[in-house]
Amino acid sequence: MDNTITRGVFLAFVRVHILHHAVEGAVFGLEMIEELRRHGYSIGPGTLYPILHNLEKSGCLRAKQQIVMGKRRKNYVATAKGKHTLEVLRKKIREMVREVLK
């Protein structure tokens, strides 16, 4: 098995998963790490935070700083572009899944 291909596909789905939750409401890094862990995936901060930053840089997420228990936390919410991107991705994923999982 080629781990490069598997990792690339996994990270693409992580991006979609983050957008999904950010459309539902604000998310933060540790929360997403725990959410992915509940699904059986282990992803560290060194992988997750660059994904969050890239989604923000691309205009799909907007970050807001908040103080929680005396510590600064960055919460991310989906922008209009992020919501539209998720809609497009859902259609594409459904189409591919139907074909691949016949």
Image (tube, rainbow, N blue to C red):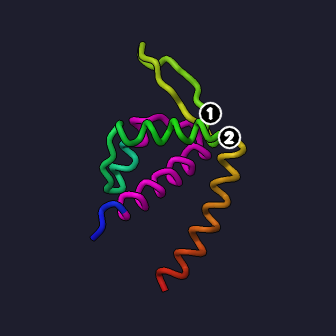
Q: Nearer the viewer, residue 37 or 100?
A: 100
Local packing at callout 1 (Cα closer than 10 Å; few below 14, some 14-19, many 20+) is many
Tell me whether the residue at label 1 lies in contact with that at label 2, contact meaning CB atoms closer than 8 angstroms.
Answer: yes
Q: Is residue 74 above or below residue 30?
A: above
Locate residue 62 relative to residue 41 in the image: left or right: right
Name the amino acid, label 2: Thr
In the orientation shown, which residue stands out farthest toward the bottom? 102
Q: Residue 32 falls in which quadrant of the image?
A: top left
* Of callouts 1 and 2, the N-terminal one: 1
Q: Which mark is residue 41?
A: none
Across and down, in percent, residue 62 comes to: 62, 33
Marks 1 and 2 sit apart, C-alpha to C-alpha, by 6 Å
Q: Nearer the viewer, residue 86 or 54?
A: 54
* Magenta residues, dominant SS class: helix
Q: Is residue 30 above or below residue 82?
A: above
Q: Which residues are magenta?
A: 5-32
For numbered disc 1, what is the local secondary structure? strand
